[in-house]
Image: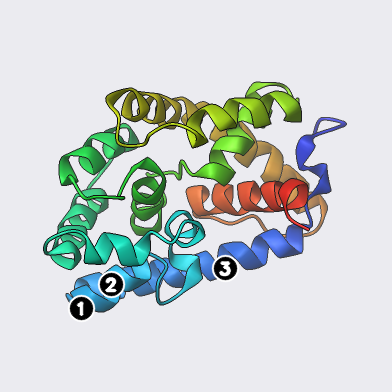
Amino acid sequence: MSVNSVLDVIIWNDALEHYKARMRVHRRLLALHESRKTSAFAKLLLGISDNQGNYSARDHGLGPRILSENLNAEMSLFRVSEKFLTLENAYNVPKIIREANLKYFRIGVGSETSCMINPQVCWISNTRSIWTHLVFKHGGNFSRANEELELYRNEDETSEMAYRKWAAIHRDMKDTLAEILNQGSLRAKSALIEPGKVKYLWADAIANALYAYHHEE
């Protein structure tokens, strides 16, 4: 284990509790999907019935808007999720999101959806995880990570350029997430905490903990 890491500030018990909460939602989503309870499924998927379902939608109040401003939104989300379930390569996630053509269902909300459905394959590209990726990309330089994150947050998400930028950073995150998982799991074990076995929900828990430490009181 390296001497220092930006992850050293994390309280690993808290990260584990976050992971367990997301795992419970993951299992509930699969059960609702299997029983074809489309309304309950959509509301959980968008973080409406449980905040843990989708931080990206919850933080920006997008869940109700997705349901109310898209025709047959519940069934459309159900079908998109079926595509996520069968994925063996998460690089296809941005394309699936785009082809769904659902208003307000962009890379942040959509990638989180993909991970909550298929977390061994699909990772989340939302504010928290992208910021963590950028912190690692810039060698622990938080100022540079904050500055670069603003380039994504201030973009018109409906534009072609925004789609390409978000799709590109989603692809680039895979290698960084591998390093985050490696460092995080080593530090969790040192704190006598068993790391999460479902890798991208565990990565989400790590990113959430790091982001919260630096951005939330």
Q: In the rendered view, would you say 17 is above or below 3?
A: below
**Residue marked by disc 2:** 41
Q: Secondary structure at mark 3?
A: helix
**Residue marked by disc 1:** 37
Badge 2 vs badge 3, beta-carbon distance below 8 Å: no
Residue 192: % across, % down: 79, 59
In front of the other: 14 or 135: 135
Query: How many dots with numbers?
Result: 3
Residue 118: % across, % down: 35, 53
Crowding at mark 1 (Cα within 10 Å: few <14, some 14-19, many 20+): some
Tell me the quarter of the picture where residue 155 sits: top left
Q: Secondary structure at mark 1?
A: loop
Residue 20 circle label:
3
Q: In the rendered view, would you say 181 is above or below 50?
A: above
Residue 105: % across, % down: 30, 50
Q: In the rendered view, would you say 76 is above or below 138?
A: below
